[in-house]
Amino acid sequence: MNDKFIYLTYEEKKIKSKAFDSNRSLAIDMNPNHIAISIKDKDKIIFVQDFDLNKLTTMMSNEHNSSDSLRFKHLNNKLKHEIIQISKKIVEIALYYKVKDLFVEKLTGILNNKQNFGKSFNRKVHCFWKRNLFIDNLKKQCNLYSINFHEILPHYSSFIGN
């Protein structure tokens, strides 16, 4: 504390830990247009949800103004806000279903491979996809609630049906 500011610190771990079901896991399949989740209990899928970002990312990719334009900044901020809200909602769902482990795709090597999927899709992947924002916020939320966060190869998260 000083004459201008009061500084607060906090522990990321919550004091109370939730009871988790050790057989339940949540897998996230993601791309620039959709984030899909599935919750699996042993061999049975008990919950599936898709978060659709296609309308927003398409509006951004069709925007022909510079990235300094007010319209583009508005859409970019809206996308960031939606991504953060989706990560919070996913953790909320995980807590409701008492999920112990959360699995997300590890796409670092794949995204560096400049494959030609078309100009529009490549632009969405390399310019608009807020993947790191999503992953970082999801890790933080999982840490807050003591949910185990795992990054796995992409074909394993897509396996359950997203």
Image (cartoon, grey):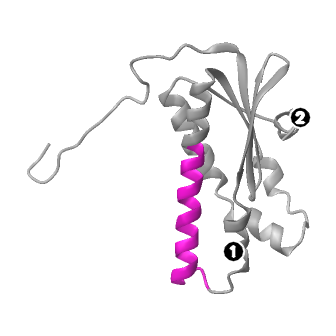
24 sits to left or right of 158: left
Kind of residue at disc 1: Met
Give the CA separation, mark 1 to mark 2: 30 Å
In this orientation, which residue lies closer to the viewer: 56 or 80? 56
Residue shown at 59%/53% (left/top)? 83
In this orientation, which residue lies closer to the viewer: 109 or 35? 35
* Residue 148 screen position, x and y as percent: 62, 24
* Residue 22 screen position, x and y as percent: 68, 13
10 sits to left or right of 129: left
The tag on residue 125 is none
The vertical placement of 153 against 20, above or below, is below
Q: Residue furthest left?
A: 3
In this orientation, which residue lies closer to the viewer: 123 or 55? 55
Q: Main secondary structure of the magenta part?
A: helix
* Residue 124 screen position, x and y as percent: 75, 66
Residue shown at 53%/23% (left/top)? 146
Give the position of the C terminus as an image quadrant. Answer: top right
**Any part of residue 83 in sight:** yes
The vertical placement of 91 against 108, above or below, is above
Residue 149 among those drawn in magenta:
no
The part of the chain drawn in magenta is 66-87
Query: Is disc 1 placed on a helix, strand or loop?
Result: helix
Give the position of the N terminus as an image quadrant. Answer: top left
92 sits to left or right of 158: left
Please rate how many residues cluster around mark 2, counting C-alpha atoms within 10 Å: few if below 14, some from 14 to 19, many from 20: few
Q: How many marks?
A: 2
Query: Is disc 2 placed on a helix, strand or loop?
Result: loop
Q: Which residue is mark 1?
A: 59
Q: Which residue is mark 2?
A: 159
* Residue 98 screen position, x and y as percent: 61, 20
Kind of residue at disc 2: Phe
Q: Nearer the viewer, mark 1 or mark 2?
A: 1
